[in-house]
Image: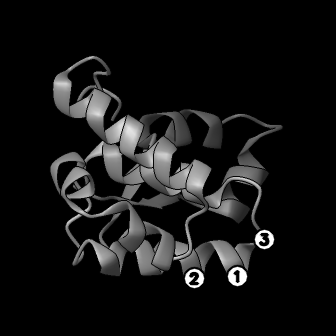
């Protein structure tokens, strides 16, 4: 995944500060992954990860993505049977929550395109 550098002007300015300058020099630029995925992908992931340990959450999320054939969209989420989501490891409540989110995003009731 592509990495982008954040806040380059702020880094330059703080780098000149006598107190922050040494930290800025030591830490360097702030680079974060940049993705072109739609916000729905991350919201669905957040629902799946809730109240689960890291390894279990990653496994279930991976199965969810595979169940959707790597097309994590509201439309695809609604087309997949609930039993498929359950077989991927989602609880009944999480499957319902993800499908509810997908329904509301698809209908426009929940607007996510500007969450970037």
Q: Earlier in the sequence, mark 2 or mark 3?
A: 3
Mark 2 secondary-structure assignment: helix
- In this picture, is 41 found above or below 2? above
> Callout 2: 10 Å neighbours few (<14), some, many (20+)?
some
The vertical placement of 99 against 5, above or below, is above
Residue 106 x, y percent position in the rendering: 19, 33
In this picture the colour scheme is one colour
SS class of the residue under badge 3?
loop
The residue lying at 27 percent from left, 55 percent from top is 77
Cα distance between the residues tagged 1 and 2 = 6 Å
Q: Is residue 39 left or right of residue 96?
A: left
Question: Which residue is at the front of the view, 37 or 59?
Answer: 59
Tag 2–tag 3 contact (CB < 8 Å): no
Residue closer to the observer: 33 or 15 = 33
Q: Which mark is residue 53?
A: 3
Residue that appears at 48% across and 60% down: 31
């Amino acid at each position: 995944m592509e990495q982008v550098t954040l806040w380059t002007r702020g880094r330059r300015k703080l780098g000149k500060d006598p107190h922050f300058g040494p930290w800025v020099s030591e830490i360097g630029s702030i680079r974060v992954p940049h993705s072109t995925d739609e916000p729905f992908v991350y919201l669905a992931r957040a629902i799946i990860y809730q109240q689960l340990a890291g390894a279990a959450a990653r496994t279930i999320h991976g199965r969810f993505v595979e169940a959707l054939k790597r097309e994590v969209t509201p439309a695809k989420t609604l087309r997949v049977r609930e039993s498929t989501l359950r077989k991927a490891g989602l609880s009944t409540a999480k499957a319902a929550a993800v499908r509810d989110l997908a329904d509301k995003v698809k209908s426009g009731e929940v607007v996510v395109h500007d969450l970037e």
